Amino acid sequence: MTKLFKGTFLTVAFLFLYAPIAVLVVNSFNKSKYGHKWSGFSWKWYEKLLENDTLLTAFTNSLTIAVLAASASVILGTFMALALYRYKFRFKQAASSSLFIVMMSPDIVLAITFLVLFMVLGLQLGFWTLFIAHTTFCLPFVVITIYAQLRGFDPNLVEAAQDLGASERQFFTHIMLPLLLPAIAASWLLTFTLSLDDVIISSFVTGPEYEVLPIRVFSMVKVGVSPEVNVLATLLLAFSALSLIAFSVLTKRKKYA
């Protein structure tokens, strides 16, 4: 009886979670425009998406911001994680705790904070404000991921490198960086995905001249879900699934002798 209940509960839970996604994916190949009924398999909505210059421009903008923000946050986050791991300094605990505050803060709070900051600084909302905001909210995820990898290292590696006369630069480039590459790659994929699908913060810190894909899609679905939106959602879903698989593979902890 218990096994039957567990099986039924899991089946209902998975149907509740994944049935809407399945409907969306199926409708992206539906010849019918409205998706109320199946009218046959077709690629025409994928072809129409390639002809939609507005959506393609928004996607290009989102891709540009995601790549740049992920790269910047990975570079800064790697050095921050190394500083927290290797050095002792005042307010170290406060700096570490502040990362979790940013991660746990609601998006609406961060969005308002960024907007107020940019208004005080007199920055025009657009590319640069979007880039700064995305880099900032992605940064804690990088630091936490890489710091967790560092905590798994054998501390004797540092002592051995120092005993052999390795400088800080040599230790980082020849020992630490190769060991951190899986965590760095995983962090980049994670932050790229976070930046690419952000809606709330982006809607506050970007201007009308630099529209990104999530905001464009959000404005489109207010008047109904078009087939192009189904196609976009399907493509993003496929990309997210591949990123998740890559993230899982890259974050597997290595065992060191």
Image (spheres, rainbow, N blue to C red):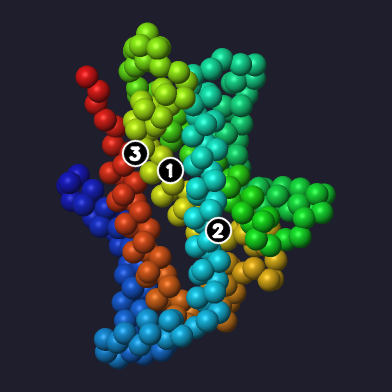
Give the label on residue 187, or none: 1
Q: Rate crowding at label 2 as few (under 14), some (14 to 19) or many (20 or more) other CA atoms within 10 Å.
A: many
Look at mark 2 in the image and give the residue it sits on: 65
Q: Residue at x 55, y 51 (%)?
A: 69
Look at mark 3 in the image and give the residue it sits on: 182
* Residue 119 pos. (x, y %): 80, 53
Q: Which residue is at the front of the view, 106 or 212? A: 212
Q: Which residue is at the front of the view, 167 or 254? A: 167
Between discs 1 and 3, the one toward the N terminus: 3
Q: Residue at x 36, y 79 (%)?
A: 28
* Residue 162 pos. (x, y %): 40, 12
Relative to 80, is 234 above or below?
A: below
Cα distance between the residues tagged 1 and 3? 9 Å
Q: Residue at x 45, y 54 (%)?
A: 193
Cα distance between the residues tagged 1 and 2? 16 Å
Q: Amino acid at mark 1?
A: Ser
Q: Amino acid at mark 2?
A: Ile
Determine whether the residue tagged by mark 3 lies in a helix, strand or loop.
helix
Cα distance between the residues tagged 3 and 2? 23 Å
Determine whether the residue tagged by mark 1 lies in a helix, strand or loop.
helix
